[in-house]
Image: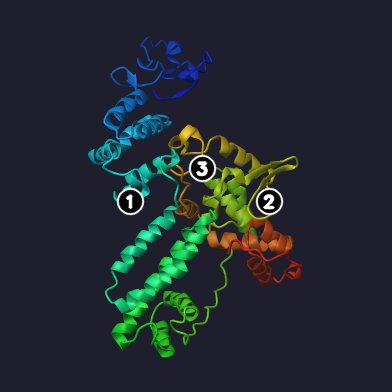
């Protein structure tokens, strides 16, 4: 009863509730001999009657008007929110989202002004899925300014972390390190529009390990960051897991800040990167380009990994504007110079752009993201892509390593770096790993990119 489209008998665009044994395909009510009036008595649109004789969209509008507009402190703002919610492709999903009494109470308090229409006001409601969805809706419909969710959660995480530190001798250097080094750097990254997911994750680990070390240092030796010696650090590093080496960044900062200038922690030598064979890479590309073992969005994500050596976090955050059309064919904007898109993959991208999932959560059925997420205005979470490709059987790091190393055997490393968004240093390192003469190819100005 919810299927709309072209009737396979009369060809008209309308509700398709019927089936005939003698005819293959969905058909409209009149062609199926259904005499019931399927039109909504309010708006006249053919749709399943959700409440009495009206459709779900009209029922949603009634509910929202009663809840948000009648007693609204700012009727104009609430009317904009109602209009945005009523444009949802699936009004039934909005009704389900706002059905719990707790969610309805939040919306009521927002309407009457008990909760301020601000990020700070929404922060006070917690971080549950429904609240996250509400924030996304308010941002998407222009009622809240967009903000970096990873940065905001990191700032909240820092406050909680600082408050949990008992000793002032531990808290002070940790707070200075976290604020002056990590928070300032992540805010600068956010200001450029780049994703802060990876930097936030790394910062949390380094701050957490620093707290563990300074707690141990105080309890075991009665010393603090400024009086710590090399023997203390060596004892700590030898006696535990490799994650303890994350304190190195703290002491690099401590040297610059003149908190402690005596500690030296060498960088850890990276293990050899895992790889897959080129035959395995080609087999996976063939499966993703022509097979049906996964849905189209994840086949495209896997192809971006295997063909262009893109990290999953970057794949998730690609925008539709990254696909560029030119007289000689489509290109993909990954670095300073766009990369050409081969024909089989170009056809997949065209099909995907025409039917991206999760557009029901987006105003006017459009989204800037190549992979829209379920929360309005957001892209698909990298972990979602990661889990789907791993379940499929792809070795993610091995696939990416083999892809970049294959490319630098065919094209000079500086050109690969510019096209794929890699740093020159990283591209040359991969070229050196496979001992290519291209490693000596003259590069242009050193650029920062994917590490």
Up the image or down, 403 lies above or below 430; here it is above
Q: Nearer the viewer, residue 449 or 143?
A: 143
Which mark is first along the chain, 3 or 1? Answer: 1
**Which mark is first along the chain, 2 or 1?**
1
Q: Which residue is mark 2?
A: 338
Q: CA distance from mark 2 to mark 3?
A: 26 Å
Q: CB of mark 1 within 8 Å of CB of mark 2?
A: no
Figure quadrant of residue 420: bottom right
Query: Which image quarter holds the C terminus?
Result: bottom right
Residue positioned 36% across, 64% down in the render: 158
Quadrant holding the N terminus: top left
Q: Is residue 144 above or below residue 238?
A: above
Q: x, y percentage for residue 189?
A: 52, 60
How crowded is the residue under tag 3: few (<14 C-alpha within 10 Å), some, or many (20+)? few
Judged left or right of residue 8, residue 160 is left
- The answer to the question of whether label 2 and label 3 lie on touching residues, with beta carbons closer than 8 A, is no
Q: Nearer the viewer, mark 1 or mark 2?
A: 1
CA–CA distance in space, label 1 to label 2: 40 Å
Measuring 60% from the left and 55% from the top, which residue is drawn there?
306
- Whichever of labels 2 and 3 marks the residue nearer the N terminus, that label is 3
Whole-percent x, y for residue 272 in the image: 57, 72
User: What numbered label is drawn on residue 123?
Assistant: 1
Where is residue 62, by image quadrant? Answer: top left
Q: Residue at x 48, y 60 (%)?
A: 187
What sort of colour scheme is used for the picture? Answer: rainbow
Is 410 situated above or below 429? above
Q: Which residue is mark 3?
A: 295
Question: Quick check: can you spot residue 355?
Answer: yes
Number of other residues with Cα within 10 Å of mark 2, as a class: few under 14, some 14 to 19, many 20 or more: some
Q: Secondary structure at mark 1?
A: helix
- The single residue placed furthest to the left in the displayed view is 101
Q: Is residue 441 left or right of residue 124?
A: right
């Amino acid at each position: 009863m919810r299927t709309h489209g072209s009737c396979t008998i009369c060809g008209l665009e309308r509700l398709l509730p019927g089936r005939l044994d003698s005819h293959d395909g969905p058909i409209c009510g009149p062609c199926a001999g259904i005499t019931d009036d399927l039109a909504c008595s309010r708006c006249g649109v053919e749709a399943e009657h959700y409440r009495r004789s009206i459709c779900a969209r009209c029922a949603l509008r009634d509910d929202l008007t009663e809840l948000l507009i009648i007693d609204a402190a700012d009727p104009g703002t609430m009317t904009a929110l109602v209009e945005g919610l009523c444009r949802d492709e699936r009004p039934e999903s909005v009704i389900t989202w706002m059905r719990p009494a707790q969610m309805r109470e939040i919306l009521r308090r927002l309407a009457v002004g008990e909760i301020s229409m601000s990020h700070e006001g929404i922060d006070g409601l917690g971080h549950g899925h429904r609240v996250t969805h509400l924030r996304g809706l308010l941002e998407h419909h222009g009622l809240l300014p967009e903000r970096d969710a990873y940065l905001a959660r990191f700032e909240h995480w820092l406050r909680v972390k600082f408050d949990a530190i008992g000793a002032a001798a531990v808290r002070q250097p940790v707070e200075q390190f976290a604020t002056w080094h990590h928070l300032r750097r992540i805010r600068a990254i956010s200001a450029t529009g780049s994703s802060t997911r990876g930097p936030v994750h790394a910062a949390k680990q380094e701050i957490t390990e620093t707290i563990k070390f300074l707690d141990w240092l105080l309890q075991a030796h009665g010393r603090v960051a400024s009086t710590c010696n090399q023997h203390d650090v060596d004892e700590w590093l030898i006696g535990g897991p490799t994650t303890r080496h994350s304190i190195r960044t703290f002491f690099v900062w401590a040297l610059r800040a003149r908190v402690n200038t005596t500690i030296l922690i060498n960088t850890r030598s990276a293990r050899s990167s895992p790889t897959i064979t080129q035959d395995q890479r080609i087999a996976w590309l063939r499966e993703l380009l022509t097979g049906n073992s996964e849905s189209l969005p994840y086949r495209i994500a896997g192809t971006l990994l295997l063909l262009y050596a893109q990290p999953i976090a970057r794949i998730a955050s690609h925008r539709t504007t990254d696909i560029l059309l030119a007289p000689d064919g489509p290109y993909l904007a990954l670095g300073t110079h766009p990369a050409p898109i081969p024909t089989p993959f170009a056809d997949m991208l065209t099909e995907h752009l025409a039917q991206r999932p999760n557009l029901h959560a987006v105003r006017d059925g459009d989204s800037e993201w190549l992979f829209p997420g379920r929360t309005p205005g957001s892209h698909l979470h990298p972990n979602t892509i990661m889990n789907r490709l791993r379940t499929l059987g792809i070795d993610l790091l091995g696939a990416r390593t083999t892809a970049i190393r294959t490319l630098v055997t065919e094209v000079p490393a500086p050109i690969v770096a510019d096209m794929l968004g890699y740093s020159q240093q990283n591209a040359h390192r991969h070229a050196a790993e496979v001992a290519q003469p291209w490693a000596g190819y003259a590069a242009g100005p050193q650029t920062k990119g994917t590490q």
